[in-house]
Image: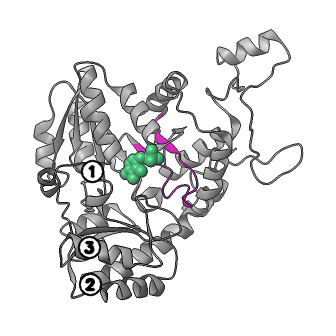
Amino acid sequence: MTGHGGKGFSTRAVRAGERTDPETGAVVTPIYETAVFAFSSTQQLVDAVSEKSSRDVYTRWSNPTITAAERKIAELEGAEDCAVFSSGMAATSTAIISLVSPGDHIVSTRDLYGGTLDFFTNLMSRFDVRTTFVEATNVSEIESAVRKNTKLLFLETPTNPTLKLVDLSKVAEISRNSGAKVLVDNTFATPYNQQPLRFGCDATIHSATKYLVGHSDVTAGGIAGPKELIGPMKKLRRVLGGVLDPHAAWLLLRGMKTLALRMEKHNLNGQQVAEYLESHPKVERAYYPGLSTHPQHSLAKRQMKGFGGVLSFELKGDLNHTIRFVDSLKLALIGASLGGTETLVSQPSRATHYFMNPEERRKAGISDSLIRLSLGIEDADDIISDLAQAFDRI
Ligand SMILES: *Cc1c(COP(=O)(O)O)cnc(C)c1O
Protein backbone atom coordinates (compact mmCIF):
# COMPACT_ATOMS: atom_id res chain seq x y z
CA MET A 1 0.00 0.00 0.00
CA THR A 2 2.23 2.79 -1.19
CA GLY A 3 1.11 6.40 -1.65
CA HIS A 4 0.37 7.60 -5.17
CA GLY A 5 0.39 11.30 -4.28
CA GLY A 6 2.29 12.48 -7.36
CA LYS A 7 0.33 10.32 -9.81
CA GLY A 8 -2.61 11.23 -12.01
CA PHE A 9 -6.22 10.91 -10.89
CA SER A 10 -6.99 7.70 -12.80
CA THR A 11 -3.82 6.02 -11.58
CA ARG A 12 -4.78 6.83 -8.01
CA ALA A 13 -8.37 5.70 -8.63
CA VAL A 14 -7.14 2.31 -9.84
CA ARG A 15 -4.14 1.70 -7.59
CA ALA A 16 -4.39 3.67 -4.35
CA GLY A 17 -5.17 1.60 -1.28
CA GLU A 18 -5.12 -1.73 -3.13
CA ARG A 19 -3.21 -4.61 -1.55
CA THR A 20 -1.84 -7.35 -3.73
CA ASP A 21 -2.09 -10.45 -1.57
CA PRO A 22 1.52 -11.49 -0.77
CA GLU A 23 0.61 -15.16 -0.39
CA THR A 24 -1.42 -15.75 -3.54
CA GLY A 25 -0.53 -12.75 -5.71
CA ALA A 26 -4.24 -11.96 -6.10
CA VAL A 27 -4.42 -8.62 -7.88
CA VAL A 28 -7.70 -7.57 -6.31
CA THR A 29 -7.86 -6.62 -2.64
CA PRO A 30 -9.55 -9.48 -0.77
CA ILE A 31 -12.83 -9.09 1.08
CA TYR A 32 -11.94 -9.66 4.73
CA GLU A 33 -15.45 -10.72 5.70
CA THR A 34 -14.61 -11.24 9.33
CA ALA A 35 -15.82 -9.53 12.48
CA VAL A 36 -12.79 -10.46 14.57
CA PHE A 37 -9.02 -10.98 14.19
CA ALA A 38 -7.09 -13.62 16.18
CA PHE A 39 -3.72 -13.18 17.91
CA SER A 40 -0.99 -15.66 18.73
CA SER A 41 -0.50 -14.24 22.23
CA THR A 42 -2.12 -11.95 24.76
CA GLN A 43 0.78 -9.52 24.38
CA GLN A 44 0.07 -9.24 20.64
CA LEU A 45 -3.54 -8.39 21.37
CA VAL A 46 -2.50 -5.83 24.00
CA ASP A 47 -0.12 -4.21 21.46
CA ALA A 48 -2.94 -3.95 18.94
CA VAL A 49 -5.48 -2.57 21.43
CA SER A 50 -2.98 0.02 22.68
CA GLU A 51 -2.04 0.89 19.08
CA LYS A 52 1.59 -0.12 19.53
CA SER A 53 1.00 -2.26 16.47
CA SER A 54 -1.32 -1.50 13.57
CA ARG A 55 -3.03 -4.90 13.64
CA ASP A 56 -6.81 -5.03 13.22
CA VAL A 57 -8.73 -6.21 16.29
CA TYR A 58 -12.44 -6.02 15.55
CA THR A 59 -14.20 -4.84 12.38
CA ARG A 60 -16.18 -2.08 14.10
CA TRP A 61 -12.75 -0.59 14.84
CA SER A 62 -10.98 -1.35 11.56
CA ASN A 63 -10.75 -3.94 8.80
CA PRO A 64 -8.23 -4.28 5.93
CA THR A 65 -10.85 -4.01 3.14
CA ILE A 66 -12.33 -0.90 4.76
CA THR A 67 -8.85 0.58 5.27
CA ALA A 68 -8.11 0.06 1.56
CA ALA A 69 -11.27 2.00 0.60
CA GLU A 70 -10.27 4.75 3.03
CA ARG A 71 -6.81 5.04 1.47
CA LYS A 72 -8.30 5.32 -1.99
CA ILE A 73 -10.75 8.09 -1.06
CA ALA A 74 -8.01 9.96 0.85
CA GLU A 75 -5.68 9.88 -2.15
CA LEU A 76 -8.44 10.96 -4.55
CA GLU A 77 -9.33 13.93 -2.35
CA GLY A 78 -5.66 14.82 -1.75
CA ALA A 79 -6.29 14.21 1.96
CA GLU A 80 -4.08 12.69 4.63
CA ASP A 81 -6.73 10.35 5.99
CA CYS A 82 -10.30 9.15 5.50
CA ALA A 83 -12.95 7.36 7.54
CA VAL A 84 -15.54 5.26 5.73
CA PHE A 85 -19.06 4.69 7.09
CA SER A 86 -22.17 2.62 6.43
CA SER A 87 -23.91 5.57 4.73
CA GLY A 88 -23.43 9.21 3.87
CA MET A 89 -25.61 10.13 6.85
CA ALA A 90 -23.47 8.01 9.21
CA ALA A 91 -20.41 9.93 7.93
CA THR A 92 -22.15 13.30 8.25
CA SER A 93 -23.62 12.71 11.71
CA THR A 94 -20.45 11.17 13.17
CA ALA A 95 -18.28 13.96 11.73
CA ILE A 96 -20.49 16.71 13.14
CA ILE A 97 -20.87 15.13 16.57
CA SER A 98 -17.10 14.85 16.70
CA LEU A 99 -16.69 18.60 16.14
CA VAL A 100 -19.36 20.27 18.31
CA SER A 101 -20.42 20.37 21.97
CA PRO A 102 -23.46 21.85 23.71
CA GLY A 103 -23.48 25.64 23.37
CA ASP A 104 -21.62 25.60 20.04
CA HIS A 105 -22.97 27.11 16.85
CA ILE A 106 -23.01 25.92 13.24
CA VAL A 107 -23.40 27.91 10.04
CA SER A 108 -24.79 25.96 7.12
CA THR A 109 -26.11 26.62 3.65
CA ARG A 110 -29.92 26.60 3.47
CA ASP A 111 -29.89 24.33 0.43
CA LEU A 112 -28.93 21.11 2.07
CA TYR A 113 -29.47 17.38 1.77
CA GLY A 114 -32.73 16.59 3.63
CA GLY A 115 -31.14 14.19 6.12
CA THR A 116 -28.46 16.72 7.06
CA LEU A 117 -31.08 19.46 7.45
CA ASP A 118 -33.09 17.15 9.71
CA PHE A 119 -29.95 16.34 11.73
CA PHE A 120 -29.21 20.04 12.35
CA THR A 121 -32.77 21.20 13.03
CA ASN A 122 -34.24 18.26 14.93
CA LEU A 123 -31.31 16.47 16.56
CA MET A 124 -28.43 18.90 17.14
CA SER A 125 -30.90 21.46 18.51
CA ARG A 126 -31.84 18.97 21.28
CA PHE A 127 -28.21 19.02 22.39
CA ASP A 128 -28.12 22.83 22.43
CA VAL A 129 -26.19 23.14 19.19
CA ARG A 130 -27.90 25.79 17.07
CA THR A 131 -27.53 26.18 13.33
CA THR A 132 -27.92 29.37 11.30
CA PHE A 133 -28.90 28.69 7.71
CA VAL A 134 -27.61 31.08 5.07
CA GLU A 135 -27.90 31.62 1.34
CA ALA A 136 -25.28 29.46 -0.36
CA THR A 137 -24.36 32.01 -3.02
CA ASN A 138 -23.92 34.91 -0.57
CA VAL A 139 -20.46 34.82 1.02
CA SER A 140 -21.03 37.95 3.11
CA GLU A 141 -24.17 36.38 4.63
CA ILE A 142 -22.04 33.38 5.58
CA GLU A 143 -19.41 35.66 7.09
CA SER A 144 -21.85 37.71 9.14
CA ALA A 145 -23.56 34.58 10.50
CA VAL A 146 -20.30 33.47 12.16
CA ARG A 147 -20.22 34.05 15.94
CA LYS A 148 -17.61 33.57 18.64
CA ASN A 149 -18.99 30.09 19.39
CA THR A 150 -19.22 28.98 15.73
CA LYS A 151 -17.28 25.73 15.48
CA LEU A 152 -18.39 24.53 12.08
CA LEU A 153 -19.21 25.82 8.62
CA PHE A 154 -21.07 23.13 6.72
CA LEU A 155 -21.85 23.40 3.05
CA GLU A 156 -22.75 21.60 -0.13
CA THR A 157 -21.64 22.72 -3.57
CA PRO A 158 -23.25 22.33 -6.03
CA THR A 159 -26.44 22.34 -4.01
CA ASN A 160 -29.45 20.10 -4.38
CA PRO A 161 -31.61 20.50 -6.42
CA THR A 162 -30.97 23.92 -8.00
CA LEU A 163 -27.20 23.56 -8.46
CA LYS A 164 -26.09 26.73 -6.70
CA LEU A 165 -22.38 27.06 -5.94
CA VAL A 166 -20.53 28.12 -2.82
CA ASP A 167 -17.21 29.90 -3.31
CA LEU A 168 -14.84 27.44 -1.63
CA SER A 169 -11.77 29.65 -1.28
CA LYS A 170 -13.82 32.51 0.21
CA VAL A 171 -15.48 30.20 2.75
CA ALA A 172 -12.09 28.69 3.62
CA GLU A 173 -10.84 32.21 4.30
CA ILE A 174 -13.80 32.92 6.61
CA SER A 175 -13.04 29.70 8.46
CA ARG A 176 -9.34 30.55 8.83
CA ASN A 177 -10.22 33.94 10.30
CA SER A 178 -12.77 32.52 12.73
CA GLY A 179 -11.18 29.23 13.72
CA ALA A 180 -14.30 27.28 12.71
CA LYS A 181 -13.76 24.14 10.64
CA VAL A 182 -15.28 23.96 7.19
CA LEU A 183 -16.77 20.67 5.97
CA VAL A 184 -17.88 20.32 2.36
CA ASP A 185 -20.37 17.71 1.24
CA ASN A 186 -18.65 16.86 -2.07
CA THR A 187 -21.14 14.18 -3.12
CA PHE A 188 -22.46 15.95 -6.23
CA ALA A 189 -19.07 17.02 -7.60
CA THR A 190 -16.87 14.07 -6.56
CA PRO A 191 -13.09 14.53 -6.19
CA TYR A 192 -12.81 14.13 -9.97
CA ASN A 193 -14.60 17.42 -10.56
CA GLN A 194 -13.75 19.31 -7.37
CA GLN A 195 -11.23 18.99 -4.56
CA PRO A 196 -12.28 21.30 -1.71
CA LEU A 197 -9.07 20.68 0.29
CA ARG A 198 -7.12 22.45 -2.43
CA PHE A 199 -9.07 25.62 -1.69
CA GLY A 200 -8.27 25.43 2.02
CA CYS A 201 -11.40 23.63 3.26
CA ASP A 202 -10.79 21.25 6.17
CA ALA A 203 -12.58 18.08 5.11
CA THR A 204 -14.90 16.64 2.49
CA ILE A 205 -17.89 14.40 3.10
CA HIS A 206 -19.32 11.87 0.69
CA SER A 207 -22.45 9.95 0.27
CA ALA A 208 -20.34 7.27 -1.44
CA THR A 209 -23.70 5.67 -2.27
CA LYS A 210 -23.79 8.06 -5.22
CA TYR A 211 -20.85 8.58 -7.62
CA LEU A 212 -18.02 6.91 -5.66
CA VAL A 213 -19.77 3.53 -5.65
CA GLY A 214 -21.35 4.62 -8.90
CA HIS A 215 -23.67 1.70 -9.58
CA SER A 216 -26.64 2.32 -7.23
CA ASP A 217 -25.92 -0.94 -5.43
CA VAL A 218 -24.32 0.01 -2.09
CA THR A 219 -25.01 2.49 0.70
CA ALA A 220 -21.77 3.99 2.02
CA GLY A 221 -20.20 7.24 3.21
CA GLY A 222 -16.83 8.79 3.87
CA ILE A 223 -15.06 11.82 5.26
CA ALA A 224 -11.57 12.83 4.15
CA GLY A 225 -9.23 15.36 5.72
CA PRO A 226 -6.18 15.73 7.98
CA LYS A 227 -5.36 12.98 10.52
CA GLU A 228 -5.97 15.29 13.47
CA LEU A 229 -9.59 15.68 12.34
CA ILE A 230 -10.30 12.19 11.01
CA GLY A 231 -8.62 10.29 13.89
CA PRO A 232 -11.21 11.37 16.50
CA MET A 233 -14.01 10.60 14.00
CA LYS A 234 -12.70 7.04 13.64
CA LYS A 235 -12.70 6.74 17.44
CA LEU A 236 -16.27 8.04 17.56
CA ARG A 237 -17.27 5.56 14.85
CA ARG A 238 -16.35 2.77 17.28
CA VAL A 239 -18.91 4.19 19.70
CA LEU A 240 -21.68 5.19 17.29
CA GLY A 241 -21.11 2.04 15.26
CA GLY A 242 -21.82 3.25 11.73
CA VAL A 243 -19.17 0.98 10.22
CA LEU A 244 -19.32 -0.24 6.60
CA ASP A 245 -19.58 -3.96 5.94
CA PRO A 246 -16.32 -5.30 4.38
CA HIS A 247 -18.17 -6.66 1.37
CA ALA A 248 -19.73 -3.24 0.75
CA ALA A 249 -16.25 -1.69 1.19
CA TRP A 250 -15.00 -4.00 -1.55
CA LEU A 251 -17.80 -2.88 -3.89
CA LEU A 252 -16.88 0.71 -3.08
CA LEU A 253 -13.22 -0.03 -3.95
CA ARG A 254 -14.29 -1.60 -7.24
CA GLY A 255 -16.62 1.27 -8.09
CA MET A 256 -13.97 3.92 -7.51
CA LYS A 257 -11.54 2.37 -10.01
CA THR A 258 -13.71 3.69 -12.85
CA LEU A 259 -14.60 7.02 -11.25
CA ALA A 260 -12.70 9.12 -13.82
CA LEU A 261 -14.19 7.25 -16.80
CA ARG A 262 -17.69 7.52 -15.42
CA MET A 263 -17.40 11.17 -14.43
CA GLU A 264 -16.12 12.11 -17.90
CA LYS A 265 -19.27 10.56 -19.36
CA HIS A 266 -21.55 12.07 -16.68
CA ASN A 267 -19.97 15.49 -17.43
CA LEU A 268 -20.50 15.09 -21.19
CA ASN A 269 -24.07 13.91 -20.78
CA GLY A 270 -24.76 16.71 -18.28
CA GLN A 271 -23.56 19.40 -20.67
CA GLN A 272 -25.33 17.99 -23.71
CA VAL A 273 -28.67 17.43 -21.97
CA ALA A 274 -28.50 20.81 -20.18
CA GLU A 275 -27.98 22.60 -23.51
CA TYR A 276 -30.84 20.64 -25.08
CA LEU A 277 -33.18 21.49 -22.21
CA GLU A 278 -32.21 25.16 -22.05
CA SER A 279 -33.15 25.68 -25.69
CA HIS A 280 -36.39 23.65 -25.53
CA PRO A 281 -39.56 25.78 -25.96
CA LYS A 282 -41.40 23.87 -23.20
CA VAL A 283 -38.66 24.55 -20.61
CA GLU A 284 -38.87 27.66 -18.44
CA ARG A 285 -35.27 27.41 -17.25
CA ALA A 286 -32.48 24.90 -16.74
CA TYR A 287 -30.06 24.77 -13.80
CA TYR A 288 -26.58 23.43 -14.55
CA PRO A 289 -23.22 24.99 -13.62
CA GLY A 290 -21.82 24.19 -17.07
CA LEU A 291 -24.32 26.47 -18.83
CA SER A 292 -22.88 29.87 -19.70
CA THR A 293 -26.20 31.34 -18.46
CA HIS A 294 -25.67 29.87 -14.95
CA PRO A 295 -25.22 32.95 -12.72
CA GLN A 296 -22.04 31.44 -11.20
CA HIS A 297 -20.59 29.91 -14.36
CA SER A 298 -17.24 31.68 -13.93
CA LEU A 299 -16.94 30.41 -10.33
CA ALA A 300 -17.84 26.94 -11.62
CA LYS A 301 -14.97 27.09 -14.10
CA ARG A 302 -12.62 28.27 -11.36
CA GLN A 303 -13.31 25.60 -8.78
CA MET A 304 -14.59 22.64 -10.84
CA LYS A 305 -12.97 20.58 -13.56
CA GLY A 306 -16.34 19.37 -14.89
CA PHE A 307 -19.93 19.97 -13.87
CA GLY A 308 -21.29 16.51 -13.18
CA GLY A 309 -24.36 14.54 -14.13
CA VAL A 310 -27.04 16.20 -12.01
CA LEU A 311 -29.17 18.98 -13.43
CA SER A 312 -32.64 20.34 -12.90
CA PHE A 313 -35.14 22.31 -14.94
CA GLU A 314 -38.56 23.87 -14.74
CA LEU A 315 -41.23 22.97 -17.23
CA LYS A 316 -43.63 25.54 -18.58
CA GLY A 317 -46.70 24.07 -16.95
CA ASP A 318 -48.27 23.11 -13.64
CA LEU A 319 -47.83 20.14 -11.31
CA ASN A 320 -50.06 17.90 -13.46
CA HIS A 321 -48.06 18.61 -16.63
CA THR A 322 -44.89 17.88 -14.71
CA ILE A 323 -46.16 14.56 -13.36
CA ARG A 324 -47.36 13.62 -16.85
CA PHE A 325 -43.94 14.47 -18.31
CA VAL A 326 -42.06 12.42 -15.70
CA ASP A 327 -44.45 9.46 -15.98
CA SER A 328 -44.00 9.48 -19.78
CA LEU A 329 -40.24 8.91 -19.61
CA LYS A 330 -39.26 5.39 -20.61
CA LEU A 331 -35.46 5.25 -20.36
CA ALA A 332 -35.10 7.45 -17.28
CA LEU A 333 -36.22 5.63 -14.14
CA ILE A 334 -38.25 7.45 -11.50
CA GLY A 335 -36.05 7.37 -8.41
CA ALA A 336 -34.89 9.73 -5.69
CA SER A 337 -31.15 9.19 -5.84
CA LEU A 338 -28.24 10.08 -8.10
CA GLY A 339 -24.78 9.12 -9.24
CA GLY A 340 -25.45 5.71 -10.80
CA THR A 341 -24.89 4.44 -14.33
CA GLU A 342 -28.62 4.68 -15.14
CA THR A 343 -30.49 7.94 -15.63
CA LEU A 344 -32.88 8.76 -12.79
CA VAL A 345 -35.59 11.39 -12.70
CA SER A 346 -37.44 12.86 -9.74
CA GLN A 347 -39.60 15.83 -8.88
CA PRO A 348 -38.19 17.44 -5.72
CA SER A 349 -41.70 18.64 -4.76
CA ARG A 350 -42.92 15.00 -4.90
CA ALA A 351 -39.84 13.35 -3.41
CA THR A 352 -36.97 14.88 -1.44
CA HIS A 353 -38.91 18.05 -0.53
CA TYR A 354 -42.38 16.48 -0.28
CA PHE A 355 -42.75 17.10 3.46
CA MET A 356 -41.85 20.79 3.30
CA ASN A 357 -44.87 23.06 3.39
CA PRO A 358 -45.57 24.77 0.02
CA GLU A 359 -44.49 28.18 1.33
CA GLU A 360 -41.10 26.91 2.55
CA ARG A 361 -40.69 25.04 -0.71
CA ARG A 362 -41.31 28.19 -2.73
CA LYS A 363 -38.74 30.04 -0.62
CA ALA A 364 -36.21 27.28 -1.30
CA GLY A 365 -36.83 27.72 -5.03
CA ILE A 366 -38.52 24.33 -5.41
CA SER A 367 -41.47 24.90 -7.71
CA ASP A 368 -44.10 22.31 -8.61
CA SER A 369 -42.69 22.21 -12.13
CA LEU A 370 -39.08 21.49 -11.08
CA ILE A 371 -37.59 18.22 -12.31
CA ARG A 372 -34.20 16.79 -11.33
CA LEU A 373 -32.27 14.47 -13.59
CA SER A 374 -29.30 12.37 -12.57
CA LEU A 375 -27.84 11.52 -15.94
CA GLY A 376 -26.34 8.07 -16.16
CA ILE A 377 -23.69 6.93 -18.60
CA GLU A 378 -26.10 5.87 -21.36
CA ASP A 379 -25.76 7.56 -24.77
CA ALA A 380 -26.80 11.21 -24.62
CA ASP A 381 -28.80 10.81 -27.86
CA ASP A 382 -30.97 8.15 -26.25
CA ILE A 383 -31.54 10.24 -23.12
CA ILE A 384 -32.48 13.23 -25.28
CA SER A 385 -34.87 11.14 -27.44
CA ASP A 386 -36.54 9.93 -24.26
CA LEU A 387 -36.99 13.52 -23.04
CA ALA A 388 -38.24 14.58 -26.50
CA GLN A 389 -41.01 11.97 -26.58
CA ALA A 390 -42.09 12.98 -23.06
CA PHE A 391 -42.24 16.66 -24.10
CA ASP A 392 -44.55 15.61 -26.96
CA ARG A 393 -47.03 14.27 -24.40
CA ILE A 394 -47.56 17.52 -22.54
C1 LIG B 1 -27.57 11.03 -0.58
C2 LIG B 1 -26.89 12.18 0.01
C3 LIG B 1 -26.51 12.18 1.36
C4 LIG B 1 -26.84 11.04 2.31
O1 LIG B 1 -26.16 9.89 1.93
P1 LIG B 1 -26.66 8.40 2.27
O2 LIG B 1 -25.58 7.55 1.69
O3 LIG B 1 -27.98 8.23 1.58
O4 LIG B 1 -26.78 8.30 3.73
C5 LIG B 1 -25.82 13.28 1.84
N1 LIG B 1 -25.54 14.34 1.04
C6 LIG B 1 -25.90 14.38 -0.25
C7 LIG B 1 -25.56 15.57 -1.06
C8 LIG B 1 -26.58 13.30 -0.81
O5 LIG B 1 -26.94 13.34 -2.10
Q: Main secondary structure of the magenta part?
A: loop
Amino acid type at circle 1 is Ser
Q: Are marks 2 and 1 in contact (CB under 8 Å)?
A: no
Is the residue 119 above or below the residue 155 in the image?
above
Residue named by callout 2:
394
Residue 322's disc is: 3
Q: Is residue 51 left or right of residue 121?
A: right
| Residue beneath the point at 18% across and 73% down | 318
Residues packed near mark 1 inside 10 Å, few (<14), some (14 to 19) or many (20 plus): some
Question: Which callout, 2 or 1, points at the residue further toward the start of the chain?
Answer: 1
Q: Is disc 2 placed on a helix, strand or loop?
A: loop
Quarter placement of the N terminus: top right
In the image, residue 313 lies at what x, y percent?
A: 26, 72
Asked which quadrant contains residue 254, the reply is: bottom right
Residue named by callout 1:
169
Residues packed near mark 2 inside 10 Å, few (<14), some (14 to 19) or many (20 plus): some
In the image, residue 239 lies at what x, y percent?
A: 51, 21
| Residue beneath the point at 26% across and 84% down | 394
Q: Is residue 323 left or right of residue 98?
A: left
